[in-house]
Image (spheres, helix red, strand yellow):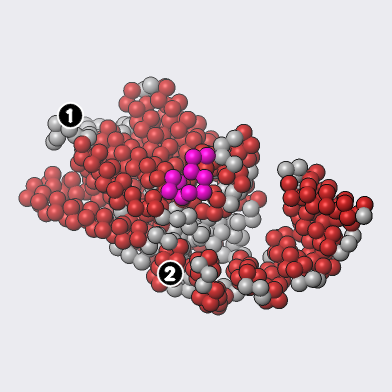
Amino acid sequence: MLNKRFQYIPAMLLCLVTAGVYARSAFFPFHLLDDAVYVTQNVHIMQALSLDTVKWAFTSVYQYNWIPLTWLSFALDAGFFGTYPMGYHIVNIVLHVINVWLLFYLLKSVTGAFWRSLLVAALFALHPLRVESVVWIAERKDVLSTFFWMLTLIFYCLYAKKKDVSMYILALFSFTLGLLSKQMLVTVPAVLLLMDFWPLKRLGIVTSPLATDENNIASEQTTLKKLLIEKIPFLLLSAAATAIVFYANYVSKSLKSTELIPAGERLVNALWNYIAYLYKMFVPINLAIVYPTIREPYWKAVCAAILIGLVSYAAYKMRHSAPYLASGFLFYLITLFPLIGLIQVGTVSMADRFVYVPLIGIFIIISWGAGDIVARWPSFRHSVVAVTGFALAGCVVMTWVQLSYWKDNTTLFRHAVDVTKENHVAHETLGLAYANEGKSQQALAEFNKALNIGPDCPELHVCIGNLFDKNGQLGEAARQYEIVTRLNPGRAAGHVLYGRTLQKMGKIREAISEYELAISMEPQNAQLYDSLGLAHLQQGQFDEAIRHFAMALKLDPSLRQTSSNLEFALRLKRR
C-alpha cells in the first residue's frame, strides 16, 4: 500500500491522462444532432444568463426535457464563449475529469481499497463508451447530473459514518440539483439502499454461528425498516421528478403508445439491451452516435432473461462472501432501468450515453473480483496486473480512435452509416452534413437512402425540401413541404414552410391559407402573424396586413422587423 502522503498521486495522474486523452475534442465543432437546438439556435441560451433565462429554464419543457440546471449551465457558457464550441467542450471534459476523481474518492473513502477503487475510476474514465457523453455538447446533462450524483453518494456515506444530519441535508440538496440536471437520478434512493448493503454494511446482518435464523431475519427486518424510512425524502423527490418526466414527454408528445410499439416488443428489446450493453463494454467496436431501432426476436429475450436470472442467483448465493457482486450487478440493472426502453421516448431505444453511470456497477464487479483473485491466489498477481494494464491500454487506444470519428459531422455520421444497418437517422444527418458543405448531390443521395428506410418521417421531407429550396427548385420544395403537412397535420411548422414556398412562387392566396392553418394551431406564435401580414401586404391588402403586424407585436413587442413591416404598411396605406 502506498504511503498516505502519496496515495492520491496515481489518482491525480489518472485525471491528467483522462484530460489528455479528451483534450483533442476541445477543437471539435458543434454537432448536427441537438447541439444547435440546445445551444446555438436556442435564443434563451444565447442571451446568456439572465432572469429571463432562469424563468424560461424552470418553467419550460424544451426538446422533451425539463432540465433547468443544464440549461443554466449552457447559458453561463454562452456568456463566456458565445457560439465558439471550444469552451463548451472544455467544460464537458472538466466535468468528466471531476467525476472520475469523485468516483475514486467515494470508493476509496468507503472501502479503503485503494487499487480497486483506482481501477474502477480508470475504467470509468477511459472506456470508449464514455466518449458520447463527454464529447457531445448536448449531453452536458450526463456529465453534470453525474457530478451531483457522486456528491449525493459521498455526502450520504459521510452521514452514514458520522450520523451528521448536515451531511444528510447536503446529500438531499445535491440530489435535488442532480434531478434538475437530468431526471435519470430517480434511481438514487435504490442505489443508496444498495450502498447500505455494500460497501457501507448497514443492513445489520448477523453472521455469528451462534445466532439463529430467526435472529438473522429479525435483525435484517429491523434495520431495513429504519433504512427505508431514511430514504423517504429521497423517494419523494424521485416521485416528483418522475411525474415531471411524464408531464414533459406528454406535453412534447414524445411518449410512444403501446399501439406503435407493443409492450411485448418493448420487453424483448429491454431484456436484450441489458446484454447488448455488456457486450459493448467488453467488445467496444462499431459504436455509433445513433442506432436504428431493431425488433429483436423473442429467443434473445429468453436467453437474456435466463442469463440475468443466473447472475442474480449467483449474486444472492455469494452475498456474504462477495457482496460487491450483488451490489454491482443490481446497480447496473437499476440505474439502467429508466433508459432500457420499457417506456419508449422518441425513437431512441439504445445509446452509448445511457450507460455513462450504470456501467460503474460492472466496473466494481471486475475490479473487486480481480482483487479477490489476487488475495486468494497470490501467484496470479502478475497475470492480473498484466491483464489489467493491457485492458486499460486498450481502452485508451479505442477511446482515441472513437474520438477521431467526432472530429466533424461528415466523419461522425459516415461512420454511423458504415457500422449500422437501415439507419435512416444517420443517413438523414449525413445528408445534412453534405448539404452544409455545399455537396447537394451527395446530400440528396443520402436523403433518398433515408427515404427508402423511413418514408413517413416528416423531418426527412423537411430536409429534402430545404435542399430544393436552397437550390431554387421551388416546385420540388413545395411538394416536399406539402407531404410534411400530410404526415404531420397537427403541427404548424410544416404549414409555415409550405406557405413560405408558395409565397415565393407567387401563389399568395394558397400561402395565406397555410399561414391561417398554422395560426389556428399556434395562436400565440407572433412570427406566424408577421408571415401572414407580409402575405397580405404582397396582395395589397393593407388593412389585413396592418392588423396582423399589430397582433404579432402585441404578442411579442421585441420583434423589430415586424415593427418595421408595420410602419411600411402604414406608409403604403397613407399613399
Q: Is residue 570 magenta?
A: no
Instruction: Look at 35% across and 39% down and name the residue there.
Output: 98
Kind of residue at badge 2: Arg
Q: Is residue 300 above or below residue 363?
A: below
**Label 1 environment density (alpha carbons within 10 Å; few <14, some 14–19, many ≥20):** few
Q: Can you give x and y, in whole percent of width and height, for residue 156 in the image?
A: 38, 31
Looking at the image, is 233 positioned above or below residue 503? above
Query: What kind of element bears circle 1?
Result: loop
Sequence-first disc among 2 and 1: 1
The picture places residue 527, in percent across and down from the top left corner, at 74, 53
Find disc 1 in the rendering and name its residue.
Answer: 5
Vertical arrangement, residue 329 with respect to residue 429, above or below: above
Badge nearest the viewer, 2 or 1: 2
- Quarter placement of the N terminus: top left
Instruction: Give the residue number, with chain letter if any, for mark 2.
Output: 414
Q: How many marks?
A: 2
The part of the chain drawn in magenta is: 79-88
- From this viewpoint, is residue 470 visible? yes
Q: Secondary structure at mark 2?
A: helix
**Amino acid type, callout 1:** Arg
Judge left or right: residue 235 versus residue 59: left
Residue at far front of view:
575
Instruction: State left or right for residue 301 relative to residue 392.
Output: right
Which residue is depicted at the point 64% across and 37% down?
52
